[in-house]
Image: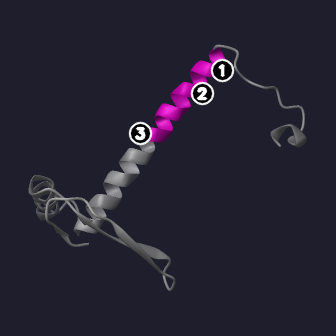
Amino acid sequence: MHIRGYYVSVTQFVTYKNMRSVINISLPKSMADLVEKEVKTGKFATKSEFVRHMIRLWNTHKLAEELKEAQKDFKAGKFKKLRSLKDLM
């Protein structure tokens, strides 16, 4: 991953050999400096690894928020009893 510039622009293509997507992004210098700083600490081998880690954290947080909402709905009685697999459809 190459990080430079100030404005965000994203392009994507898929390499089918290993099914990875390559995304090139531009970040404000302050953000790029933060990424570089974290990589230099040795916690992350590459800038890409850092970004993947941040996306995983974001996704975990998003799923936790969705679970909290579902639990609130359940407690409020907003659910449907499933009597068979057909009820899922």
Tell me if residue 76 is in the magenta stretch: no
CA–CA distance in space, label 2 to label 3: 14 Å
Q: How is the image coloured?
A: one colour
Verify CB contact (< 8 Å) between mark 2 and mark 3: no
Label 2: which residue? 70
Q: Residue at x 13, y 54 (%)?
A: 34
Give the percent coordinates (x, y) of residue 24: 29, 70
CA–CA distance in space, label 3 to label 1: 20 Å
Left-right relation of 59 to 44: right
Verify CB contact (< 8 Å) between mark 3 and mark 1: no
Left-right relation of 54 to 85: left
Q: Which residues are magenta?
A: 62-75
Instruction: Name the N-terminal-most of marks 3 and 1.
Output: 3
Could you say whether the residue bearing mark 3 is in a helix, strand or loop?
helix
Q: What amino acid does circle 2 point to?
A: Ala
Label 1: which residue? 74
Q: What amino acid does circle 1 point to?
A: Phe
Asked whether 13 or 54 is in front, the reply is: 13
Q: Main secondary structure of the magenta part?
A: helix
Local crowd at mark 1 within 10 Å, few (<14), some, or many (≥20)? few
Looking at the figure, which quarter contains the C terminus? Answer: top right
Looking at the figure, which quarter contains the N terminus? Answer: bottom left
On residue 61, which mark appears? 3
